Image (spheres, rainbow, N blue to C red):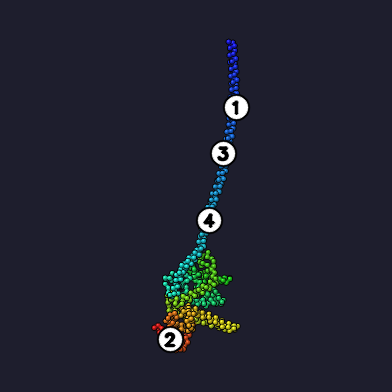
C-alpha cells in the first residue's frame, strides 16, 4: 500500500512533470510557430507593400507617360489644326487671287475677244462676199439680199469701192503716191492723210461708240491724223484723231486691236510692203467695180442714178485727162531742160518712160470713169486712144454722159462716127476731151453725132 502510494505519487509527479515539460515544449512550439507566423506575416506585408509600391510607381510612370503622350498629342493636334487653318487660309487666298486674276484676265482680254468676234463675223460673211463678187463678175447683177447680209464695217463691202468719192480717191492716189515715194511729198501732207484715211478706214474706224476710260467720254469717230515711219524704215505707224460725243478731240495712237481698252497698249505697226499692197488693192478694186459692165447694180443700191452726177463725172474725167497731159508736158519740159548731160538713147528712154506712165494714168482714168471700158482692151481692138478721147468728148458734150463701148448701140455710133471722119466729109479736128472747145452747141460735129446716134437707134 505504501509502495503503491509511493508509486502513485511518483507516477503523479512524473505525469505532472511530463505534462509541465510537454506544456513548456508546446508553448515553445507555439511561440516558435507564432514567431514564424509573425515572420511570414511581416514577409507577406513587405511583399505586399513592395508590390503596392511597384504598382504605384508603375501607375505613376504610366500616368506620366500618358500625360506626356496626351500633351504631345495635344500639341501635335494643335499644330495640325493650325496648319489646316493656315492651309485653308492659303487656299482661300489662292482662290481669291485666282478669281481676281480671272477677272483681270477677263478685263484684259475683252478687247481681244471683241476683235476675235469681229473676225469671226467677217469669216462667216466671206461666202456671201464671194458669192456677191462672183455674181458681179459673171452677170453684172446682184441679189439685194446678198448685198444686205454684208456688214457695213466689212473691209470688202462694195460701198467702199464704188462711187465718185472712191474714184476721186484713187485718182488722188495715182497723183500723190509717186511724189510720196520719191520724197517730193511728205506722208503727213493733208492730201496724203485724207486719201490714206479712206484706204485704211476698216482698220481706223474699229470699235466706234466705245467709252474712253481715260476721259470717260464716248468715242464718236476716228480719222487718220499722222503717219509715222519706224526708225528702221520698215513700218508705218498710224496716229489717230479721236472725236468724242461732246465734240472734243484727242490724238491717240492706233493700237493693235483698235480699242480704247487700257490693256490694248500695243501700238499698231504696218509693214511698208503690206501698206502699199493695201493701197494697190484698194485702187484695183475701185477700178474693177467702177467699170461700166459691173457698176450698175451698185449704183442702184448705193447711189441712185443722177444725170447731174453723170455730167459731173464726165467733167471730172476731162479734168483728169487735162491734169495728166499737163503733168506729162511739165515732165517732158523738165527733161529737155535738164537732159543736156544725157545721150540720145538715155533721153529717148526717159521720154518713153514719162509717156508710158502718162498712158498708164490715162488707162486708169478710163477704167475709173467707165469711158468705153479699159483702154488696154480698146488698143487691142485697134481703137486709137486719141480718136476715142475725141469721140468721147463730143459724145459727152452732146448727150451729157460718157459713151460705153461695151454697149452695141454706142459701138455702132462710134464706128459710124469714125467712118464719116475717115471718109473726109468734114475735115475738122475734134479737140481732146482735156481741152475746152469753142464750137457752138449745134456745131457740125454735134449734129453729126446726133444723126449717127439716131440711125444706130433704129
Q: Residues within 10 Å of mark 3 (few under 14, many from 20)?
A: few
Q: Position of residue 91 (x, y in %)?
A: 53, 54
List the residue tagged with mark 3. Answer: 59
| Secondary structure at numbered mark 4 | helix
Residue carrying label 4 = 94
Name the side, left or right, on which 72 lies relative to 146.
right
Mark 3 or mark 4: whose residue is earlier in sequence: 3
Choose top left, top right, bottom left or bottom right for residue 453: bottom left
Q: Which residue is more in the foreground, 110 or 403?
A: 403
Q: Against 69, is 381 above or below?
A: below
* Crowd rating for badge 4 (residues with CA inside 10 Å; few <14, some 14–19, many 20+): few
Q: Quick one: SS at disc 3?
A: helix
Report the disc number at residue 448.
2
**Image point 44% across, 79% down: which residue?**
406
Q: Tell me which numbered mark, 3 or 2, is placed earlier along the sequence.
A: 3
Rounded to the nearest whole Å, what is the CA distance between mark 1 and mark 3? 35 Å
Q: Nearer the viewer, mark 3 or mark 4?
A: 3
Amino acid at each position: 500500500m505504501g509502495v503503491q502510494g509511493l508509486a502513485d505519487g511518483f507516477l503523479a509527479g512524473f505525469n505532472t512533470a511530463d505534462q509541465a515539460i510537454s506544456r513548456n515544449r508546446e508553448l515553445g512550439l507555439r511561440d516558435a510557430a507564432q514567431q514564424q507566423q509573425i515572420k511570414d506575416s511581416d514577409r507577406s506585408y513587405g511583399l505586399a507593400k513592395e508590390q503596392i509600391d511597384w504598382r504605384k510607381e508603375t501607375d505613376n510612370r504610366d500616368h506620366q507617360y500618358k500625360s506626356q503622350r496626351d500633351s504631345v498629342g495635344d500639341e501635335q493636334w494643335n499644330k495640325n489644326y493650325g496648319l489646316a487653318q493656315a492651309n485653308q487660309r492659303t487656299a482661300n487666298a489662292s482662290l481669291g487671287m485666282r478669281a481676281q486674276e480671272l477677272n483681270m484676265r477677263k478685263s484684259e482680254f475683252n478687247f481681244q475677244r471683241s476683235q476675235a468676234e469681229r473676225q469671226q463675223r467677217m469669216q462667216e460673211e466671206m461666202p456671201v462676199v464671194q458669192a456677191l463678187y462672183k455674181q458681179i463678175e459673171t452677170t453684172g447683177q446682184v441679189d439685194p439680199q446678198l448685198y444686205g447680209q454684208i456688214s457695213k464695217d466689212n473691209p470688202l463691202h462694195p460701198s467702199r469701192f464704188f462711187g465718185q468719192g472712191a474714184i476721186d480717191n484713187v485718182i488722188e492716189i495715182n497723183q500723190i503716191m509717186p511724189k510720196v515715194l520719191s520724197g517730193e511729198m511728205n506722208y503727213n501732207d493733208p492730201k496724203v492723210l485724207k486719201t490714206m484715211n479712206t484706204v485704211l478706214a476698216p482698220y481706223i474706224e474699229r470699235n466706234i461708240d466705245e467709252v474712253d476710260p481715260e476721259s470717260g467720254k464716248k468715242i464718236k469717230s476716228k480719222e487718220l491724223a499722222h503717219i509715222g515711219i519706224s526708225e528702221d524704215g520698215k513700218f508705218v505707224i498710224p496716229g489717230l484723231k479721236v472725236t468724242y460725243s461732246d465734240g472734243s478731240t484727242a490724238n491717240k495712237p492706233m493700237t493693235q486691236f483698235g480699242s480704247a481698252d487700257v490693256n490694248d497698249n500695243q501700238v499698231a505697226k504696218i509693214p511698208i510692203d503690206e501698206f502699199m499692197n493695201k493701197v494697190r488693192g484698194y485702187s484695183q478694186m475701185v477700178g474693177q467695180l467702177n467699170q461700166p459692165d459691173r457698176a450698175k447694180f451698185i449704183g442702184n443700191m448705193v447711189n441712185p442714178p443722177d444725170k447731174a452726177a453723170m455730167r459731173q463725172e464726165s467733167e471730172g474725167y476731162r479734168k483728169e485727162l487735162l491734169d495728166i497731159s499737163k503733168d506729162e508736158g511739165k515732165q517732158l519740159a523738165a527733161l529737155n531742160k535738164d537732159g543736156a548731160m544725157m545721150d540720145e538713147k538715155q533721153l529717148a528712154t526717159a521720154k518713153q518712160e514719162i509717156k508710158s506712165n502718162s498712158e498708164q494714168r490715162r488707162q486708169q482714168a478710163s477704167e475709173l470713169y467707165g469711158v468705153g471700158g479699159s483702154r488696154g482692151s480698146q488698143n487691142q481692138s485697134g481703137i486709137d486712144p486719141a480718136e476715142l478721147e475725141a469721140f468721147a468728148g463730143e459724145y459727152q458734150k452732146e448727150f451729157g454722159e460718157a459713151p460705153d463701148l461695151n454697149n452695141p448701140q454706142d459701138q455702132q455710133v462710134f464706128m459710124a462716127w469714125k467712118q464719116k471722119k475717115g471718109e473726109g466729109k468734114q475735115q475738122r479736128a475734134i479737140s481732146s476731151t482735156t481741152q475746152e472747145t469753142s464750137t457752138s452747141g449745134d456745131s457740125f460735129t454735134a449734129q453729126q453725132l446726133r444723126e449717127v446716134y439716131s440711125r444706130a437707134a433704129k
